[in-house]
Each structure stands twice: as C-alpha cells, then as structure tokens.
Amino acid sequence: MRIKALLIGATIFAAQKLLRLGLLLIAVAVFTFVLLSLSPIDPVKAYIGADMMQISPEQQALIAERWGLDQPIWSRFLDWLGQLLQGNMGTSLVFNQPVSQVIALRFQASLQMLAIAWFLSGLLGLGLGIIAGALQGRWIDRLIRLYAYTLASSPTFWVALLLLIVFAVSFKVAPICCAAPPGVLSGNVTFWQHLHHLLLPAVALSIIGIANITLHTRQKLIDVLHSDYVLFAQAQGESLWNIIRYHGFRNILLPAITLQFASLSELFGGSVLVEQVFAYPGLGEATVQAALRSDIPLLVGIVFFSALFVYTGNTLADLAYPLIDPRIQLGGQRSL
C-alpha cells in the first residue's frame, strides 16, 4: 500500500509540474515576444549596422521579408509557435544560425562557469553560515556578517571589475579576457588553460550568491540552537559541534538547498554581466549581442531556455527534499 501511495503521489507531482511548466513557458513566450516586438530598436537597421546608408529602401524591404519582419506581430508569433512545436526555434539574425544551435554552443561554455559558481556559492555559503551561527556574537561572526552584508548589496559587474583589476591587471595571475588564450585553436587548448580562464569569472559570479546563503543559514542555525531540544541536549553535556552535526544540520540543509536552487536564476542573470566584463563567449554574451541588435528569435529562445533551466532547478530541489528528510513527501507534505 505504501508503494502504491508513493507511485500515486509521484504521478500527481509529475503531472502538476508538467502543467505548471507548460503554462509558464507559454506565458514567458507571449510576454517576451510582445515586449521585444514593441522595442524601439528597428531589427532591420540593427541587422544592417554601419552599412545602413548604402542599403536602398527596396533592399531593406527584402531583408524584412526574408526574416518575416514585415508581418503583423500576431502572425509572427503564431508562425514561431508553430515552428517551436516542430522543434524549430527559428534562425538568429545575429549569428545566421538556428537558435537552438546558438544556445547549445554558447550554453556549453556558460554551463562550466555556472556549475563552478553554483558549487562554490553553496559550499562556502553553507560553511560560513554554520560558523557564524555557531559562534554568534564573536569576532568571526561579525566579520562574516560584514562580508555578507557588503557583498549582498554589491552589483555583480562591480565585483567582476574589481577582481579583474586586482588579479588580472595588478597581480597578473589571471587572464584578462576570453575562454582560451588568444590565437590558440579550440582543439589545442589544454584543460589547465581552459580552467585558468574560467576560474576568475566563476569566482566573481559565485561571490554574490555566497552572501545570501550565509545569512539565511546563520539565522536558521541560531533558531535551532535556541530550541528546547537543543537546550536539553546541552544540559546533558552534548558538545556544540555534535549538536550541529546530529540536530542542526538537517534543519539548516533544507532552506539552504531551497536558496541554492533558487539562486540559479540570479546566476543566470549575473552571467550576462560577468561574461561582458571578462569577454567570455557564453550565453550571456550572446544575449547582449542579441539585445543590442534586436535579434527577436534568439532573445525569445534564450528567455524560453532560461525559464526552463530555472524551473528544472526548482524541481530538482523539490525532489531532493525527501532524500534529506524522509518525512517529507513529494508535494511538500510531511508524513507522521
């Protein structure tokens, strides 16, 4: 009976998630397509660029017809939606390649940076939060809080520029740009060269996320340490670190995981700024190029993909809860 109940719960959970995902993607596609279509930037002029004076109105009309920009907005959206249902997200005006191909190639570069930043922010944020909460009121707690409050209010691009100036310009221990040494073919780039160019952008992206997880973990641990059962354990002679290990860790891990997966959207948005500062050829840099040149198919595809990426991260967080606390069932219910 228990297995049958678990299967029913898992089926309901999956159906709810798929329904919400479908509604979310439809809403994201509609709003993004409408807002970008109402942009004051003319896609034809942005596509032509500096050669605008050399292109006749007739040629501009042919370019608009080639990309379907002469059609009404509702007609373009229905055409895009029909192609999407067939697995085709359109063609990028900037790169003159299928949107799915551009996103796949650029996301491969961004994924490595996002993964390193995600793990760094989670591990360091959790560790610093535990130390600050366990040593509440001491100098190390005040130091960690000063660090967290300062960086939580710091813009991502400012932190990235500061790291670039210090480590790449002043100390010259990190490269100043790009994902590989200039002039070296991608097939000849070694693992260590790639990691050397990747590490500083990933650190810059992770610093902001560390602050939020640190502050929330610290406060949650303080609440746990002031609970009745922890006070009873202390009265029985239990050490502080054993209390954190056996009583506090599970309680602080659930909100930490929630924040960690919720930070995927912040990391995805922050990567746009970090990749611009470090000239890193990832999906964020492609987003800026598409925005500046009003590449509507690519922008809609990137927003569509980012919504799917963040929603997948939140779903993984829901699936991780029962593994940490078996009392939690799918859907957020607790078993007695």
Image: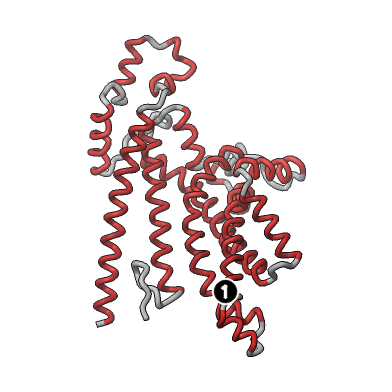
The reply to whether residue 52 is in sight is: yes
Q: Residues within 10 Å of mark 1 (few under 14, many from 20)?
A: many
Indicate the position of residue 286 as horizontal and vertical percent values: 47, 37
Which residue is labeled 1 in the image? 224
Q: Is the C terminus in the top left, top right, bottom left or bottom right quadrant?
A: bottom left
Res 302 → quadrant: top left
Q: Is residue 256 left or right of residue 138?
A: left
Choose between 313 and 170: the one closer to the eye: 313
Q: Is the N terminus in the top left, top right, bottom left or bottom right quadrant?
A: bottom left
Q: Is residue 250 left or right of residue 19?
A: right
Q: How many marks?
A: 1
Q: Is residue 112 above or below residue 42?
A: below
Q: Which residue sits at x=46%, y=46%?
A: 107
SS at mark 1 in the image: helix
Q: Which residue sits at x=26%, y=66%?
A: 12
Q: Is residue 56 above or below residue 106?
A: above
